[in-house]
């Protein structure tokens, strides 16, 4: 089958899965095998044997058995690259193979005959030397029957009789040994930790073609623009208006599987503050990006849909009915490209597509905006009880001196000082 089908289903510009390139000059004689327990739309076990420079792969719905009387259906799937064998973590829901992946067993395998000829003939016999599985096994391809034949992908995985044989009536190896062979974790623990994420979504964000995007590494330090308070909304066209969300300014920096949370000044949060916000970091990690910086406001949303900054400490601690919610409104960096010179309207369009990949499955929400009259937006925001409105130039950049204007509701008359904006500390 080769790696063509594996590569066809993935876009390696946005995925952390390794590209399907056969390893060059592979010298070692031992071949690896791996079995990954995969909770996707249905729980199954991905059985993989290294052969011909790739991992030949089968989906085994019920998992392997040590009982020779039990014949397990094994549906052949696309070949995977050898580097796939180390993965344990999460593929976000809605993407190809979305779900939790547990590394159930791994080791080496030895063919009993010529593996290339036996695989081509559909009768592959081999010995496994793993942590959980040992001894002889066979993969037998089912021959099509009837006028239309059968499914060409269907095989049977069968244990051969030897000293490693176990009667299935005494319990299955998959039930007795459900844990990860590398970390000892369960599927639920891996799903909760979200420490490794791969994205198999085939859609791609074409960052390189965006006007103003510059190829660059992730900035070591970034100074976020600040809001300037005004008594009246800006006049004229070319502005985007957002509702102010009561909460704390929070940025998130994504570098591979690592997510660093930053305060309004661009400095990392303390370890204690970051630990209390680990749910936010875990959800940001699900974004389909190798590297990114997102800017937003962290708050708690009551059941009636209103943000409530006072409920944030309880939401961070998992108490109360208010839901922890991270409203993101800007994207200064994405996948090898500095977007600080990209017009705001285009940055927000990219951000909308990025958040749309994970959406309701996380605490992330896009802070939407409208164009048009700032006066009309301010009037309506105040009528709805919003504390203030935010206005930013549609073609504006993301620089410290960018024109980001905050107009509170109940602003004082002209000539009198505006009250300072009350914010929840990002380091609480």
Image (tube, grey):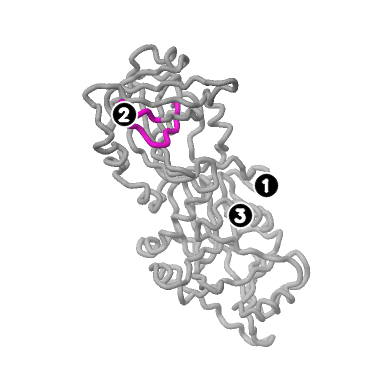
Name the secondary structure under disc 1: loop
Q: Where 296 sits versus 257, above or below?
A: below
Name the secondary structure under disc 3: helix
Residue behind mark 2: 107
Residue 169: x %, y % from top left: 26, 36
Give the camera-side residue of 417 and 126: 126
Q: Tell which circle, 1 or 3, labels the residue nearer the N-terminal end.
A: 1
Name the secondary structure under disc 2: strand
Q: Residue at x 38, y 26 (%)?
A: 157
Q: Quadrant of the C terminus?
A: bottom left
Range drawn in magenta: 56-72
Seen in the image, is 215 located left or right of residue 53? right
Seen in the image, is 49 located left or right of residue 287? left
**Circle nearer the viewer, 2 or 1:** 2
Q: Residue at x 61, y 59 (%)?
A: 399
Residue behind mark 1: 210
Q: Residue at x 46, y 59 (%)?
A: 280
* Rendered image: mark on residue 351: 3
């Amino acid at each position: 089958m080769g790696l063509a089908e594996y590569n066809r289903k993935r876009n390696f510009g946005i995925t952390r899965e390794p590209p399907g390139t056969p390893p060059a000059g592979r010298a070692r004689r031992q071949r690896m095998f791996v079995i990954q327990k995969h909770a996707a739309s249905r729980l199954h076990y991905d059985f993989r044997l290294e052969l011909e420079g790739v991992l030949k792969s089968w989906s085994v719905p019920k998992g392997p058995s040590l009982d020779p009387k039990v014949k397990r259906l094994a549906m052949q799937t696309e070949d995977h690259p050898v580097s796939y064998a180390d993965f344990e973590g999460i593929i976000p829901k809605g993407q190809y193979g979305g779900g939790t992946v547990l590394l159930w067993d791994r080791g080496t395998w030895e063919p009993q005959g010529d593996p290339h000829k036996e695989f081509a003939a559909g009768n592959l016999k081999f010995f496994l030397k793993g942590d959980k599985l040992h001894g002889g096994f066979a993969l037998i391809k089912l021959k099509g029957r009837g006028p239309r034949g059968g499914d060409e992908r269907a095989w049977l995985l069968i244990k051969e009789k030897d000293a490693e044989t176990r009667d299935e009536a005494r319990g299955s190896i998959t039930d007795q040994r459900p844990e990860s062979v590398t970390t000892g974790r369960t599927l639920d623990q891996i799903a909760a930790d979200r420490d490794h994420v791969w994205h198999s979504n085939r859609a791609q964000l074409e960052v390189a073609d965006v006007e103003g995007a510059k190829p660059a590494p992730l900035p070591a330090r970034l100074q976020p623009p600040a809001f300037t308070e005004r008594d009246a909304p800006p006049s004229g066209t070319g502005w985007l208006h957002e509702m102010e969300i009561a909460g704390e300014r929070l940025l998130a920096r994504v570098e591979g599987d690592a997510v660093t949370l930053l305060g309004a000044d661009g400095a990392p949060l303390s370890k204690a503050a970051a630990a209390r916000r680990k749910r936010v970091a875990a959800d940001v990690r699900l974004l389909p990006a190798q590297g990114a910086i997102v800017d937003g406001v962290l708050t708690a949303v009551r059941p009636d849909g209103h943000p409530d900054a006072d409920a944030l400490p309880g939401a961070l601690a998992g108490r109360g009915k208010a839901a922890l919610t991270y409203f993101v409104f800007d994207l200064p960096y994405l996948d090898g490209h500095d977007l600080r010179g990209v017009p705001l309207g285009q940055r927000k369009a990219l951000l909308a597509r990025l958040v749309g990949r994970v959406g309701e499955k996380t605490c992330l929400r896009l802070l939407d905006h409208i164009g048009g009259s700032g006066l009309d937006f301010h009037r309506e925001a105040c009528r709805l009880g919003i504390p203030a409105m935010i206005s930013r130039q549609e073609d504006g950049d993301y620089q410290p001196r960018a024109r980001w204007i905050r107009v509170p509701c109940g602003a004082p008359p002209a000539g009198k000082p505006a009250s300072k904006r009350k914010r929840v500390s990002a380091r609480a």
